[in-house]
Image: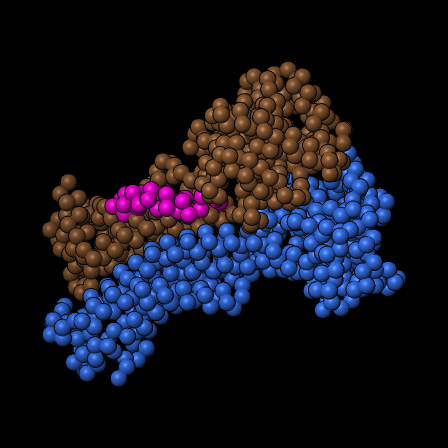
Chain colours: A blue, B brown
């Protein structure tokens, strides 16, 4: 017969301080563990949201990002004439040839300089990147030194607010609009007229081209034709994959470091749980003896104390996950190592992260509770009953 | 003294519990030391910088280059002794995800400005005599198994194509903080190739490094250099080498802040574990405390007794943790050496860890002290633990 879980539950409540401290210890570890996973996932989610399923990105062969890429004018016209490209309301192909450079802006918070993406966009860009919407001000006027700024950049950088001005390439550029883009990486960028910018930076060519496909299933055909074309020397990627790839360095670094720290960290909490369980058993020797006299087997005692330890750690796991999920209200921003530019993102929770965190907590409970439970199960009935 | 002896005896009453607590504290202190070492590793580049070197880059952003012609103009600024230049090359070897620093440098002057980068005369002679030569750091050479004389093909990202280089030799760092994981190739090799393929991109460098006569002149000289190029298409921003390095570190400021927060949470867990242990002991010994009070021990004796025990445990854990930090950090540093070329635990990190252990010892004894001193003799004697 099994010892009811209610017995363990009452026992944990009986010693509130010890239980509370142990739960808090495990909670802290789970908080860090799930916080780190949420951070890594937040970066990935933001970048994945940036690309659309039905867009293709064209960059120069072997360039890893748009920053290193350039596409010459004769190549532009070849790419524009591909039949898979969707057409806009005016009948023109939905192709955005864009200039991509970095400028240094200072953060409002501490004045530190950071690299911000400056994207020169054309008339088709707003249709190709369909998630982008102006929320304040107006669109820039073609031919004028005007900019529209992503929401995150406007919140974080000096001079990037509506009516502000940003200086580069011997000119002051006025901020006339703020846009949002479904929490994607575009919200960390600054956009202006591509022709104005090419002239200002004295550049003859655009960096990349983004094409909207009429039928996304034709992507492979388009990719093969463009990549094999001897007049071009380009890589064609699905926009979604192109952006998702940019999360690689950051997320793998954060995951490796975070998991190593959490595992080392968890030793502290496991030992805390062990101390608590050993003390529980020492204090309850008489009870254990009584249970044995009543006919409960050694294995019942073992599983009962293991269950108690798991309950303890699960409570810690829940505390940790609940506090970690409050982090998702916070937006943070850092330089993405793959693009060398500032990226704003949030902590993001997924069911998997919650599950991993609770499993991690339960593992801590099992590891911490096993030896004490064995000791309880091996107690001699007579000595246990005689204990004070 | 007697009280201290009694406190240590008390700590030995539950050997398993005390032992576990000490191990728990040691692991936490070690984790703290490790995270602090990771943070230090970030700042290694800034620490390694010399106060008498200035770096000039394009004011808009470092990704924009500067014309080669600036070199002669910068040399004319009073106080500037030598000028060299470098250009970020950004190529990779076989796998783009295996990042390493590689840049094109002026083969005549670059190593003169960096005395902490030790290049033997044979290597330098090879580098200067062969156009496609490259000098690599020891860590990088070990990583890819490169030896002097090897042919190495890098794949360009910023400058497309395959770049066949010959390893002229291996450089070593003079100091522990010198990065030994970079590759330097010749700028003139890059430039001549560009002149033949993409002539508009030729004739540019990434940044200038100036050696100045005295660090005290840094502000004046920086301003003088920048004012020369004001209102040109490529305005400059001149900083000391340290500021230049710190500006890169600041870009990862959020990650560093997160690591700092985690290191404080670790101190939190230290406190929880020790408070739990001390709380248990105090609860079990309430009747003893009452007996001691009856015998005439004053409250401050009890305070001393409990605090001594708590400090004994926390300092044992702290010292063990500090000792464990060294093997742990060297193992971790070995595993992460491509991320952190310089990975050294600093004495001040361990000192901080020790101070935290001490504070935790004091804080953890507060609650049991309150309980022991407040309880009345009658209640204490009645208590059954």
- Taking the spot 69% from the left edge, 32% from the top edge, the residue there is B192
- Taking the spot 59% from the left edge, 35% from the top edge, the residue there is B103
Q: Quadrant of the N terminus of chain A?
A: bottom left
The x, y position of residue B250, in whole percent, is 56, 40
The x, y position of residue A90, in whole percent, is 88, 62
The x, y position of residue B352, in whole percent, is 37, 40
Q: In which quarter of the image is residue A224?
A: bottom right
Residue range corresponding to the magenta coloring: B315-340
Seen from the viewer's position, the closer of residues A158 and B153 is: B153
Seen from the viewer's position, the closer of residues A359 and A125 is: A125
Query: With B362 as the anchor, is B332 left or right in this view?
Result: right
Q: In which quarter of the image is the C terminus of chain A?
A: bottom left
> Can you see residue B23?
yes
Seen from the viewer's position, the closer of residues B311 and A128 is: A128
**Magenta-drawn stretch contains B206:** no
**Magenta-drawn stretch contains B321:** yes
**Is residue A91 depicted above or below A204 in this figure?**
below
Query: With B147 as the anchor, is A19 left or right in this view?
Result: left
**Is residue A297 depicted above or below A369 in this figure?**
below
- Taking the spot 20% from the left edge, 63% from the top edge, the residue there is B385
The x, y position of residue A158, in whole percent, is 68, 42
- Taking the spot 88% from the left edge, 63% from the top edge, the residue there is A91
**Is residue A328 depicted above or below B366 in this figure?**
below
Q: Would you say the magenta stretch is mainly helix, strand or loop?
A: helix
The residue positioned farthest toward the right in the image shown:
A90
Query: With B344 as the anchor, is B109 left or right in this view?
Result: right
């Amino acid at each position: 017969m099994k010892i009811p879980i209610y017995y363990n539950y009452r026992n944990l409540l009986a010693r509130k301080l010890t239980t509370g401290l142990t739960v808090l210890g495990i909670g802290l570890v789970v908080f860090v563990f799930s916080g780190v996973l949420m951070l890594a996932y937040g970066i990935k989610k933001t970048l994945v949201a940036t690309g659309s399923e039905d867009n293709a990105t064209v960059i120069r062969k072997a360039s890893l990002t748009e920053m290193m890429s350039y596409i010459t004018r004769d190549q532009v016209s070849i790419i524009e004439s591909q039949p898979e490209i969707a057409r806009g309301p005016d009948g023109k192909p939905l192709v955005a040839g864009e200039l991509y450079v970095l400028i240094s802006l200072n953060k409002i918070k501490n004045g530190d300089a950071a690299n911000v993406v400056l994207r020169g966009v054309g008339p088709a860009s707003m249709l190709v990147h369909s998630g982008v919407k102006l929320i304040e001000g107006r669109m820039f006027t073609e031919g004028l030194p005007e900019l529209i700024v992503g929401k995150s950049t406007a919140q974080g950088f000096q001079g990037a607010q509506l009516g502000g001005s940003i200086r580069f390439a011997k000119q002051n550029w006025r901020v006339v609009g703020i846009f949002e883009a479904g929490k994607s990486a575009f919200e960390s960028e600054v956009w202006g007229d591509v022709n104005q910018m090419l002239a200002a930076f004295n550049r003859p060519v655009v960096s990349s081209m983004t094409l909207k496909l009429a039928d996304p299933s034709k992507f492979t055909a388009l990719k093969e034709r463009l990549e094999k074309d001897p007049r071009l020397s380009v890589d064609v990627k699905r926009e979604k994959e192109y952006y998702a790839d940019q999360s690689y360095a950051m997320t793998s670094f954060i995951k490796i470091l975070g998991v190593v720290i959490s595992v080392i960290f968890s030793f502290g909490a496991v030992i805390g749980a062990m101390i608590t369980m050993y003390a529980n058993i020492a204090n309850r020797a008489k009870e254990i003896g009584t249970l044995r006299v009543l006919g409960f087997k050694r294995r019942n005692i073992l599983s009962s104390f293991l269950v108690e330890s798991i309950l303890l750690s699960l409570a810690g796991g829940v505390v940790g996950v609940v506090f970690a999920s409050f982090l998702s209200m916070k937006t943070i921003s850092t330089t993405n190592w793959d693009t060398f530019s500032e990226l704003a993102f949030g902590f993001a929770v997924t069911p998997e992260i919650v599950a991993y965190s609770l499993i991690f907590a339960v593992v801590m409970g099992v590891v911490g509770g096993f030896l004490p439970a064995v000791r309880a199960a091996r107690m001699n009935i007579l000595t246990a009953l005689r204990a004070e | 003294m007697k009280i201290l002896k009694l406190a240590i005896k008390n700590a030995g009453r539950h050997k398993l519990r005390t032992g576990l607590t000490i191990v728990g504290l040691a692991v936490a202190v070690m984790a703290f030391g490790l995270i602090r070492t990771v943070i230090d590793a970030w700042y290694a580049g800034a620490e390694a910088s010399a106060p008498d070197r200035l770096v000039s880059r394009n004011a808009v952003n470092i990704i924009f280059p500067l014309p080669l012609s600036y070199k002669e103009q910068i040399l004319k600024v009073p106080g500037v002794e030598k000028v060299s230049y470098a250009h970020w090359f950004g190529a990779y070897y076989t796998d783009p995800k295996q990042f390493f620093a590689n840049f094109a440098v002026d083969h005549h002057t670059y190593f003169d400005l960096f005395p902490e980068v030790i290049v033997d005369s044979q290597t330098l002679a090879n580098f200067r005599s062969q156009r496609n030569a490259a000098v690599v750091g020891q860590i990088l050479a070990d990583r890819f198994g490169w030896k002097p004389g090897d042919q190495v093909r890098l794949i360009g990202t910023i400058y497309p194509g395959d770049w066949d280089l010959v390893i002229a030799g291996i450089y070593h760092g003079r100091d522990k903080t010198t990065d030994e994981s970079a590759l330097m190739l010749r700028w003139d090799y890059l430039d001549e190739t560009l002149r033949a393929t993409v002539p508009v991109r030729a004739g540019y460098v990434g940044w200038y490094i100036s050696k100045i006569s005295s660090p005290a002149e840094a502000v004046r000289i920086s301003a003088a250099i920048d004012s020369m190029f004001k209102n040109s298409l490529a305005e400059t921003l001149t900083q000391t080498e340290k500021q230049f390095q710190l500006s890169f570190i600041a870009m990862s400021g959020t990650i560093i802040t997160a690591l700092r927060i985690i290191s404080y949470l670790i101190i939190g867990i230290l406190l929880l574990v020790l408070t739990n242990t001390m709380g248990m002991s105090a609860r079990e010994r309430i009747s003893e405390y009452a007996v001691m009070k009856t015998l005439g021990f004053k409250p401050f004796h009890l305070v001393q007794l409990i605090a001594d025990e708590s400090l004994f445990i926390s300092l044992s854990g702290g010292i063990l943790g500090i000792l464990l930090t060294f093997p742990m950090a060297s193992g971790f540093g070995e595993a992460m050496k491509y991320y952190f070329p310089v990975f050294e635990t600093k004495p001040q990190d361990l000192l901080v860890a020790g101070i935290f252990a001490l504070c935790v010892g004091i804080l953890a004894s507060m609650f049991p002290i309150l309980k022991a001193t407040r309880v009345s003799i009658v209640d204490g004697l009645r208590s059954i633990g």
